[in-house]
Amino acid sequence: MNTIFIVLPILTILMFDLGLVLKPADFKLIAERPKPVLIGLGGQIILLPLIAWGLIELSAVSIQLSAFSIIGIMLVACSPGGSSSNVFSMLAKGDVALSVTLTACSSIVTLFTLPLIMAWVTAGVGEAVNIHLPVGKLLVQNIVLMVVPISIGFVLNLFRPETAAKIHNVLKRVAMPALVLLVTIFFVQHRQTIVAEIGSLGLMMTALILATTGCGALLARLCRLSGKERRTLVIEIGMQNAAQAITIACSPLIFNNESIAIPAIIYALMMNLVLLAYVGLTKMSKE
């Protein structure tokens, strides 16, 4: 079974679902509370890739990562947000409006930052394994699979809010099981490779999650944000759009290489474990 035929509808559904909860007021938040929005975007767009590359450089001393793994790790780091982060923000007693705003903004900004960073990465490590990045095709694919469904959901919510709410109530129950199904199928298909690399990549992806969530918490505290804003930034900066990373890795138009998707699969597993533990801690918090 070709994974791309599963991940494409999942990513489209996730982006459409994000549009269904977007309101014009969410974009006003940028002007009303620019500090948490700018800090969150800075963490997602700039800090995440820097941390990922730093971890890759540090690991080179003891772990021999393949070029496919390096490209896959950086692809995860360049794919922030996703509608699942809004659910986790709600569960963690965070600022859901801020979460939605950050997810929408990062989805737009990464249309341009992701190709730039990944072009640099593939130029550095991809040549040896004959991996090249067609930047134009990546931009078109992201517009079709992300911007278009978000826009359709947004317009539907603007003119038919009751219908949008009903559809969202269905999709929010479907999206996570669909992602779990994708991870399960991918694991079965590539179990030998995943088992062989789970030691190095599992450690790397867990370190990435812990480092980014920790930096998100530190940034929020240094900037004196409220408790709800801090919890949201921890999740938004630490939680990546694994579905987007898998789509780009497997797409026949882009990398067309499922080995590049393995870090995203392992990341999806570790991310949910770490963030569920974080949500559990917030439940016990009095803040």
Image: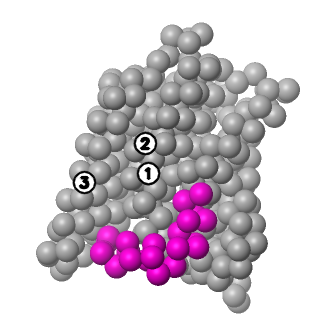
Look at the image and say whether residue 118 sits in the magenta stretch.
no
Query: Residue at label 2?
Result: 112
Residue 175 to residue 262: above or below: below
Measure the C-alpha gap from mark 3 to mark 1: 16 Å
Q: Which residues are magenta?
A: 21-42
Kind of residue indicated by mark 3: Pro
Q: Residue at x 40, y 44 (%)?
A: 111
Task: Give the image quarter of residue 212.
Answer: bottom right
Callout 2 secondary element: helix
Tell me how the rendering is colored.
one colour
Measure the C-alpha gap from mark 1 to mark 2: 6 Å
Does residue 184 appear in the picture of this structure?
Answer: no
Q: Residue at x 74, y 47 (%)?
A: 207
Callout 1 secondary element: helix
Query: Residue at label 1?
Result: 109
Q: Residue at x 34, y 41 (%)?
A: 142
- C-beta proximity under 8 Å, tags 1 and 2: yes
Which sits earlier in the primary sequence, circle 3 or circle 2?
2
Question: Could you tell whether 209 is left or right of 110 in the image?
Answer: right
